[in-house]
Each structure stands twice: as C-alpha cells, then as structure tokens.
Amino acid sequence: MDYKDLVGFYKKLGSTQSSLEKTSILSDLFSGKDDRELEILVKLCMGRIFSAWKDEDIGISSKLMVKALKKVSGSGEKAINQEWKSTGDLGKTAENLLGRKRQQTFAVRKLTVEKVHENLKAVADFEGSGSQSRKIDNISELLSMANPEEAKYIVRTVLRNMRLGVGEGIVRDAILEAFFPIILDIKDAMGEDIREKDVLIDKKVSNDFLEEEKEFEPEIFNFGSVKISEIEYDRFDVIILDKTDARKLYSYLKDAVQHGYDVTNDFGDVAVTAKNRGIKGLLGLEMKIFRPVNAMLAKKVDTIKEGFETVGKPAGVDYKYDGMRAQLHKKDDEVKVFTRRLDDVTEQFPDVEKAVKEFVKSDECIIDSELVAYDPDDGSTVPFQKLSKRIKRKYDIDEMVENIPVEIRPFDIIYLEKALIKRKYSERFEKLESIIEEENDVIRLVDRMVTDNEEDVNSMQQRSLSEGQEGIMMKNLDAEYKPGSRVGYMVKLKPVMETLDLVIIGAEWSEGRRSGWLGSLTMGCKDDDGNYLEVGKLATGLTDKQLEEITNRLEPLIVEEDGRQVKVSPEVVVEAEFEEIQKSPTYTSGFALRFPRLKRFRDDKEDADSIEKVARLYKSQN
Ligand code: ATP
C-alpha cells in the first residue's frame, strides 16, 4: 500500500470525533490486506512502530527532530522553532516547511507503508556513539522522499503524537467490523438502510460454531446460550430473532477479539488471527512468557461498605503497599521483571531476578506483585519516590540494590504452565501460595485476609497505614483477571478525608497483653466557649510503640480515674484521619468519627479544631 493512501485514512480519522465513524474508517483500512501489511497498519494507526509489549523506543526527541527538519528543509533552527511555536505541532511544522521547499523542487519518490515502517524500525536499532547523527540522517532521508502531508504524519509517528483519537477500544471494534459480520436483530435487518455488509451471521461464522436451531454454549465466555434459526431472507445466512440474543452474540464476538488482545498484547497478531482463523483462532491465542500483558487496575472506593458492595462478600483484603508494580516472568532459569508500563527493568532489579529464581517454585509462571522498598538499617518502609530512583538507573546498580533493597510482595498469578486469567481469583491465589517459598526481606506473599466483616477490614486498614503503607485493596474472590482494565474486580481504599486536629480528653487502661498502657483515646473538638466536646474514640490500629508513647504523655495528665476510665487534662493534640463523619448521639459533639486513626502527634499545636470545622466536614461529605 502506498503511504499516501494511508495518509488519506489518517486525514479521514482526524476529521471526525465520532468513535463509530473512526471504527468504520479503520475497518475499511484493515479489510483486504495481506498479513504483513495488516500487521503494520494496525501498529501505525495507533501511532506505534513496535507492538505494545515490546520495550523498544525509536529514541528521537523533538529536539533531534528539529535537527532532521533543518537538514531536509534547508531552514535554520531558529525559523523551524518559530514555525513550531505558531503551529504547536512539529508534524504540521514539517508539512509547512516542506510545502514551501517543494514549490522549488519536485524530488518526491513513492513511499510505501512498508518502506516507512522498515526505515523507522531501523532507526531504533542505532545505538552507541554516533547513533544520534545516524538517526537524524535516516529520518531526514525518509522525510526527503515524502510529500509535505506524508512528512507531517511521519513526524507525528516518530514523536508518538498522532492526534487521531484512535485508542485500543476503537482498534478492537474495527477488527471486529473488518473480519466479522455485524450483528443485527431482525427488526433492524428488515429496515431500509442496510448495507450488504451488515449481514447477520455469515457462513464463515456459522460453520465455526453455530448450528441452526441449536443452542451453542461457548466454553470460554460463559454468558448463557443463544438460539439461532435460519430464515429465508435473501441477503442473510442466519437471522437472530431476538434483540437480546443479538446483543449477546455481538458481545461474544467482541469478547473474543478482546481476549486475543488481553493475552497477546498485540493488535497486529489479533487482526491477522481474526482474518485467517476467525473466532476459534482468537480463542486459541495464548499468553507467552516474557511478553508482558497489561496489568489489571483498581477502582477507587471511599468506604469499606462501598468496597464490599463493589467486590462482594466475603472479599480478599490485602495491604495496599506504597511500592512499584512488577510483573515477574519466569521460564526455567530465566526471569524478567516488567513495570506497569511494560518496560523491562530486569537489569535494574538483579536482586528481584535472583529472588524469583530461588524462591518461586515453578518452571513457567507470570506473577503480579508489588516491590516494596525498605530501609536497610531499620527495616522501615521507604516510600515509592525513593524506590523510583532504581527504575531508570543505568549505572551503579549494585550500590542501589544495597541502599534501596526491595521485598517482593506477590499478590496474584496470571500464568502457571498455562494462562490463568479466566480462573477465579481465589483459585489463582491458592496456586500462587503453592509456588512461593517465603523468605523475610526477600519475598513474602501480601498481608491478606478473607473476610466479610467491616471491622476486620478497618483494623487491617489501620495497621497498613500505621506501617507506612497506603491503605488496602479489596478483591472479588470469584473474579477473573482482566488485563488493562480498571474494572471493579479489585478496589483500592485510601484515606482521602481532610484530617482533624483533636485533643485527647480521656483514655482507658488496656487489658491483657497491653495492660499497663493507656489506649482507647477519647478525642475532643472545641466549642466557642472553650469546652471540649467528644467526637469519638480512637481505639484500633495503635502500635505498641504508639501506645507506649501515649501512656508516657497522658499518665502525668490524669485528673480523674474511675475504674479503667481516666480523664486527662486536655493538652495532647493529635491529628486524626478517619473514613467519614457520622451524626451520633453517643458523643457530646453530636458527631462521631468513623474508623479514626492516629496520624501523628501535633506538638506544634496547642488546641483542637472547632466544632464548626467538624460540622463543615460532615456537610462536605454529602
Ligand atoms: P495508585 O496511585 O493508587 O497506586 P494506580 O493508578 O497506580 O493507583 P491502581 O490500579 O489504581 O494503580 O491501584 C492499584 C495499584 O496499587 C497497583 O497498580 C499496584 O501497584 C498497587 N498495589 C499495592 N498493593 C497491592 C495489592 N496488594 N494488590 C494489588 N495492587 C497493589
């Protein structure tokens, strides 16, 4: 295909905002191409040169591109920068500059899609000394063969800024439209404006898995069954009688294409498979070790109750660590570590590579985990900001390993000798447990429990936060693993409320292991007359260290004792986090903090926040 024809498609894509229209344009582009061309077109329309899972980058910045444009356009850097400033787009700048030049020279040669793609791929391979000038030479050579419009899109491709609004969903739907019939129910089919293409189910599909008048139940996607019947109607092979069934079938086909992408992370492969091997081919696509897949993401919830509503009861509840997501691939004695953006960081994390080799008892697996950094001196958690220094590090890696060691906290498994993404999370976790040999400071399964009790979740949340982690994750035990999706199969709960500074006005002598320590702190805010009004009790989630400090501070302040209860002079100010504020007759302020947690002592403050602030925060929740 000539590159200029692809540019025609780019222009059409850029001229509409409608996803449906974009899908249709792409579907036309994909139809009738041979495998090689199809693979390249799928990548190029997404503004990519390599597949999503390949950790390769062409390595040309805007600055280098200006140099290439200088070479090919004959304009000076200053003029180019000026033009760039006014267009805000180096692609458009290239078009303008070359447009002016071409009025004098007409040396444009015919560029094919394959040629452009090959050249760009080659540019990525230049490495080491002198590679920058070779990159510039190569790009300027390619631009010199292009007409101004083509140059615009070549520049945009190189800079990964296509401005076409073509995302993964659109490409998936376009593959569906290009290689599978569009599903319509009979009412639509009887309508006037049906294109020949809008048949219901054609023979190709029906031979694959549909038999007339029979129910079919696909093995992988369990959505029930669809009843098909053949009707004499000249334009269609099969007509689906019911709109719901039509929708089910459409989802089935769409899920098959999505499945192909989920496991391969490569729409090029998906398109070629859809074209040649249909649904069966797509469903047969498999995950491959060392080809990372997109990580499943979490939805955010504000309360534990909402968490349970989203993921169901009981749920798996994990610590949410303040670390770095890592997908760990292992095959025999080889291990690779990928970031959430699918970059290969094995070189930066030789400690993780070694640990996986030693403590993961499987010859073929993909594990989802969080790498949590700790202070080598006292073992305390080090925040992600510090750990992030290790991600791009190219030198002194051993020193980094020593100064910022990490512990691997595996929380899911997506492959164990075969893909597990369609398996229930509870099953996956069992498999994960069976292959991890735990070793302190090296690799330990996540802190986790299975519960349906809000109080238990709260205690875990408190512990997680007091240990310097971010909060908790709640997970649906029956859910599959959905790569790349922010579905509600797992949710994150982090404290988001504004905090309150409160004064401790009472406490209780603890019992059992903690007897001798004051705990269960009554906290107060202040009214206009200077009185302290209770807003709740801070009872759970206090560490031994905190209890000891609290006792040391409060004991000298005790003014009244009644059994285990004590009243203290209102002098210690604490900053409290909490999940929400509720109305409550139990406390003198009329409000109660739900699940309060001690964030820190506010020695810099002498007084508590006012009842007005509590009331304001209460109102702002609704
Ligand atoms: P955030 O900034 O909150 O980490 P995010 O956009 O990076 O959000 P989300 O999917 O929204 O990612 O939140 C889940 C993230 O939390 C994961 O990407 C992972 O890095 C991290 N995480 C920490 N502990 C866990 C755990 N036990 N289970 C799953 N993810 C965890």
Image (spheres, rainbow, N blue to C red):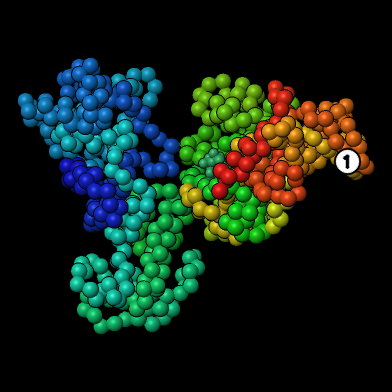
In the image, residue 617 sits, relative to residue 404, either above or below, namely below
| Left or right: residue 613 compared with residue 161 | right
Residue 267 placement (x, y as % from top left): 37, 50
What is the crowding at mark 1: few (fewer than 14 residues within 10 Å), some, or many (at least 20)?
some
Residue found at the very far right of the displayed protein: 563
Residue found at the very far front of the displayed protein: 529
Quadrant of the rendered image containing residue 372: top right
Residue 437 placement (x, y as % from top left): 71, 44
Residue ID for mark 1: 565
In the image, residue 21 sits, relative to residue 546, either above or below, namely below
In the image, residue 181 sits, relative to residue 319, either above or below, namely below
Q: Residue at x 52, y 25 (%)?
A: 393
Which quadrant contains ligand 1?
A: top right
Closer to us: 191 or 499: 499
Q: Residue at x 34, y 70 (%)?
A: 205
Residue 261 placement (x, y as % from top left): 42, 53
| Left or right: residue 202 compared with residue 168 | left
In the image, residue 127 sits, relative to residue 31, either above or below, namely above
Closer to us: 81 or 212: 81
Q: Can residue 355 be seen in this view?
A: no
Q: Residue at x 60, y 41 (%)?
A: 617
Q: Residue at x 22, y 21 (%)?
A: 82
Closer to us: 395 or 341: 341
Residue 236 placement (x, y as % from top left): 25, 75
- Identify the secondary structure beneath mark 1: strand
Which amino acid, by three-letter code, is at mark 1? Gln
Quadrant of the rendered image containing residue 409: top right
